[in-house]
Image: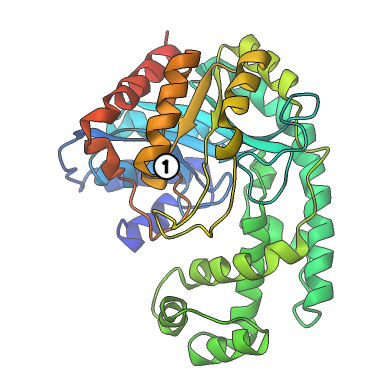
């Protein structure tokens, strides 16, 4: 985590301020050497949900020794130009893209759970290697889908207020100001839970009073969560709280996404038109979570061959995955299928919390050299 005073400067209200502050910060910054194995192509920013503006994300990635980084935001690519500008200032090559939920209606995966914990028939996919002159095309394409998501978000706020009437959240007043929606940023369930966390802190405070309030709400905290709630000095207290609230309340208030999810053929057509890579995001069944942050759940492993057949049939030519999150057996099978079906392999591990490191230690393993090489191919592709 970068110094909080620097982070505050790089998270200033406007892009112009953030870039200007970066120029000042760089006058007193000595970066560590770049590590060739350290790449991460899946960094979320404030244009979806993250403690980092695009400028801060670039600076933080470079401070941890990354040799390249990539921006990925939900339903939005509006932070990409700032990300590119900041990257030039720190002299780090980067790649840009975005993440979206895609309807599998009409495909062999219709009505089946793939990589989405919340909803069957809808898959997470990324758009990677976006040519820089196509950013505006993506922004316009996703504008109506963002509007549809706002409608569903408002309905979920209503459900929160029914569960917790003493909180009285307002979407316009409490949620949207926490987002970059005014600049075409995405608004996710995490924003709803963050607004709830802020309201709770405002009502009951931090520390033991919060622990008591959560117990009153019927939540049983782990020892780790209790320790976090008692740490009143942690500058991102509400981030820890939203994690607790997300696990407890999102399943109760979640409404299936429909109109906000583009259909797979439309996404394939879009990516061909802008010359970007559409990637299926492999998740894999979770047993004893390798990273300790996922509950046990079945995803696509029982019919992974069908997933690859679907991708081939529909014209999807790439797969992205997170090596740290899977077992060696899952990775061996996945990588074998990628080679069998001629899928371009891309990697990156999502950053959306201040407690996370930007470094993917798995990349130190020579077996993942192809994922490092793929990153440089993405960068070359964007700049050709």
- Can the viewer see residue 20 in this picture? no
Q: Residue at x 47, y 79 (%)?
A: 222
The percent coordinates of residue 317 (x first, y second) are: 54, 16
User: Which quadrant does the C terminus fall into?
Assistant: top left
- For residue 169, side relative to residue 347 (left or right): right
- For residue 188, side relative to residue 331 (left or right): right
Quadrant housing residue 148:
top right
Q: Secondary structure at mark 1?
A: loop
User: Which quadrant does the N terminus fall into?
Assistant: bottom left
The percent coordinates of residue 48 (x first, y second) are: 58, 46
- Can the viewer see residue 209 in this picture? yes
Q: Residue at x 60, y 32 (%)?
A: 125
Quadrant housing residue 110:
top right
Q: Toward the viewer: 99 or 150? A: 99
What kind of colouring is applied to the model shown?
A: rainbow
Q: Say above or below: 313 vs 299.
A: above
The residue furthest front is 302
Q: Residue at x 59, y 49 (%)?
A: 298
């Amino acid at each position: 985590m970068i110094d909080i005073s620097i982070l505050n400067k790089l998270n200033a209200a406007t892009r112009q301020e953030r870039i200007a502050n970066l120029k000042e910060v760089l006058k007193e910054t000595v970066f560590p050497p770049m590590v060739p194995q350290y790449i991460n192509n899946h960094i979320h920013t404030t244009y979806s949900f993250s403690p980092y503006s695009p400028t801060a994300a670039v600076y933080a990635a470079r401070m941890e020794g990354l040799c390249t980084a990539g921006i990925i935001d939900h339903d939005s690519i509006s932070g990409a130009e700032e990300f590119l500008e900041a990257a030039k200032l720190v002299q780090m090559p980067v790649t840009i893209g975005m993440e979206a939920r895609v309807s599998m209606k009409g495909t062999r995966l219709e009505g089946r759970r793939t990589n989405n914990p919340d909803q069957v028939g809808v898959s997470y996919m990324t758009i990677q290697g976006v040519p820089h002159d196509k950013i505006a095309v993506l922004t316009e394409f996703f504008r109506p889908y963002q509007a549809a998501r706002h409608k569903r978000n408002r309905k979920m706020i209503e459900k929160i207020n029914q569960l917790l009437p003493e909180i009285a959240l307002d979407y316009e007043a409490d949620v949207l100001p926490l987002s970059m929606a005014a600049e075409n940023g995405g608004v996710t369930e995490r924003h709803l839970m963050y607004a709830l966390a802020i309201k709770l802190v405002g009502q009951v405070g931090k520390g033991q009073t919060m622990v008591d309030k959560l117990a009153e709400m019927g939540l049983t905290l782990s020892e780790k969560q209790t320790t976090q709630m008692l740490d009143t000095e942690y500058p991102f207290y509400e981030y820890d709280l939203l994690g607790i609230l997300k696990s407890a309340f999102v399943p109760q208030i979640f409404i299936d996404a429909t109109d906000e999810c583009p259909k797979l053929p439309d996404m394939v057509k879009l990516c061909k038109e802008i010359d970007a890579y559409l990637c299926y995001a492999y998740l894999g069944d979770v047993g004893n979570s390798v990273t300790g942050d996922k509950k046990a759940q079945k995803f696509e492993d029982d019919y992974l061959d069908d997933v690859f057949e679907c991708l081939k049939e529909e014209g999807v030519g790439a797969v992205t995955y997170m090596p740290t999150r899977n077992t060696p057996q899952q990775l061996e099978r996945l990588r074998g299928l990628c080679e069998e079906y001629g899928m371009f392999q891309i990697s990156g591990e999502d950053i959306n919390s201040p407690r996370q490191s930007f470094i993917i230690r798995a990349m130190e393993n020579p077996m993942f050299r192809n994922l490092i090489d793929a990153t440089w191919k993405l960068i070359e592709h964007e700049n050709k």
